[in-house]
Image (tube, grey):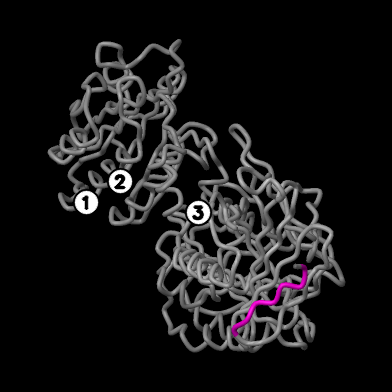
Amino acid sequence: MSVLITAHTLYAPVSLSQVVSLQRFALPVAMAPGWLQVVCLLLLGMRAAQGTTMDMQNAAAMAAGLCNTRPTDLVFIVDSSRSVRPSEFEQVKVFLAKVIEGLDVRPDATRVGVVNYASRVKNEISLKATRTKAALTKAVSKIEPLSTGTMTGLAIQFALNVAFSEAEGARVKSQGVSKVAIIVTDGRPQDNVREVAARARDAGIEIFAIGVGRVDMNTLKQMASEPLEEHTDYVESYSLIEKLTKKFQEAFCAVSDLCATGDHDCEQVCISTPGSFKCACHDGHTLKEDGRTCSACSNSATDVVFLIDGSKSVRPENFELVKKWINQIVDKLDVAEKGAHVGLVQYSSTVRQEFPLGRFNNKKDLKEAVKKMDYMERGTMTGQALNFIVENSFTVNQGARPGVAKVGIVFTDGRSQDYIGDAARKAKENGFKMYAVGVGNAVEDELREIASEPIADHYFYTADFKAMTQIAKKLQINVCPEENPCECDSIVKFQKKQVGYGRFPHVRNETLSLSLAVSSAGLHWSRSQSLGTVNSCVSGRGRADDHNN
């Protein structure tokens, strides 16, 4: 006899120590000990795929058509003044090509133009040119720097009057097509930008302003559309501009399945709805009032310490974003005397404890204390800071509670100026669950060294401080003890309600429940039908017991 086993919800990254279901997978198997081999192969295959990152999921979603570019007339306005070295201009062209690669380039979808400027302005690529991505990329690669002054206002005026004109291929506003300009510049303009940028915005052009190196930040704000935090970006050098690619691909993306792309903040289960999503929970858990998190472990006592990089590279305006990010995570915690306790440590060339664990037992006071944290500036001694939370923050003298789960959340935006290996290893050896979050110039190898296993669940990186809010949504502090029925090392449960067809009508409305247990004693399985007894783990080596034949 054969049945069709279908698993319909992916609860968590696959691991032999977790209870999971499998999404959109159907497999005919024989109901005999032999099908254990099939299940094992299935699990091993899924385990091999476990390391997939969120970036790969987004790329796959775009390739699969889950992310459809909105109809857009997009014009890049690129500074090639003498302050931009030839090698740096090549990096700008790579950035343009990668953004284009993520777009749906067609005459009735996205049209792309490029305006090159210095003391004069040159229309390099017109919106009216019907091109494939390959042709566009090739045209971008041939653009040469003009290497004179920096007339940014003149370039914006040219884009408004010429590049976005119907004569050059722009579509009329009534067609529901967005008009977007992305300005890339590295210096202070030699003309006025405020008034001409305002006219461009009034004409319906959405302006993103990217500043590099010694750019004047006030100029970026004068050019960009509101809200400024979403339309202005800064990178320290042209070598980092490529890291903004994902942001701009997503800016033009109309996601049709937010769950599939991972662009949601559900703690456990995401259910797609048209243009949106809703959250659900595993069996035995209930959805909390926030509609995102689940309550089974919400009352678990947890000691959480934030370790925050306050070095000079962060910059004051970004440090304010970091504080908002901390409070975004605090909002998701059950802060209470018997719930989550939170401590805060800032570091630069030295380490400073802002407040210890347990000082605040309500979110209001805790968040106010975070807002009052002063920016330290100076260096980046991450190793020294990690050692501080190991030897101080998580001690009883500093408010840590014996027997309570310990969680460290490390934020940094640059390379550590000291060695982090020993302190990072000691933190994990002490049983602390360590999350590593990096922005901008953070070294991803260092973040991985800090993060607990599995690294994919405990390590986050973004090029842009403004994207930290997305990390806060995805960072889930879960200290729930893993269920371990029958002291088996792991259990995987599949359930399927059979509808009955063909030669086996008698299986109609039968509920089949299969438990696969892997322990040091070997591989075991058991089966129960509806109205039957729920089986516990089956003992013995290499045999299958069916208690409900």
Q: Is residue 52 left or right of residue 538?
A: left
Q: Is residue 343 left or right of residue 137?
A: right
Q: Give how far apart the Cα atoms at labels 1 and 3 are.
A: 23 Å
First in sequence: mark 1 or mark 3? Answer: 1
Q: Is residue 87 above or below residue 404?
A: above
Asked if marks 1 and 3 touch (Cβ < 8 Å), the reply is no
Residue 194 forms part of the magenta stretch: no
Q: Which residue is mark 3?
A: 465
Q: Is residue 182 left or right of residue 510?
A: left
Query: x, y percentage for residue 543?
Result: 62, 81
Q: Which residue is mark 1?
A: 88
Label 3 packing within 10 angstroms: few (<14), some (14-19), many (20+): many
Label 1 packing within 10 angstroms: few (<14), some (14-19), many (20+): some
Q: Which residue is mark 2?
A: 186
Q: Give how far apart the Cα atoms at labels 2 and 1 are.
A: 10 Å
Q: Amino acid at mark 2?
A: Asp
First in sequence: mark 2 or mark 1? Answer: 1
Q: Give the image quarter of residue 139.
A: top left
Seen at 65% across and 77% down, the residue is 544
Q: Which residues are magenta?
A: 542-548
Q: Amino acid at mark 3?
A: Phe
SS of the residue at dot 1?
helix
Asked if marks 2 and 1 touch (Cβ < 8 Å), the reply is yes
Seen at 36% across and 30% down, the residue is 181
Look at discs 2 and 3 and give the one toward the viewer: 3
The one of 366 and 301 positioned closer to us in this rendering: 301
Magenta residues: mostly which secondary structure?
A: loop
Query: x, y percentage for residue 18?
Result: 64, 69
Query: x, y percentage for residue 517?
Result: 65, 76
The one of 16 and 121 positioned closer to us in this rendering: 16
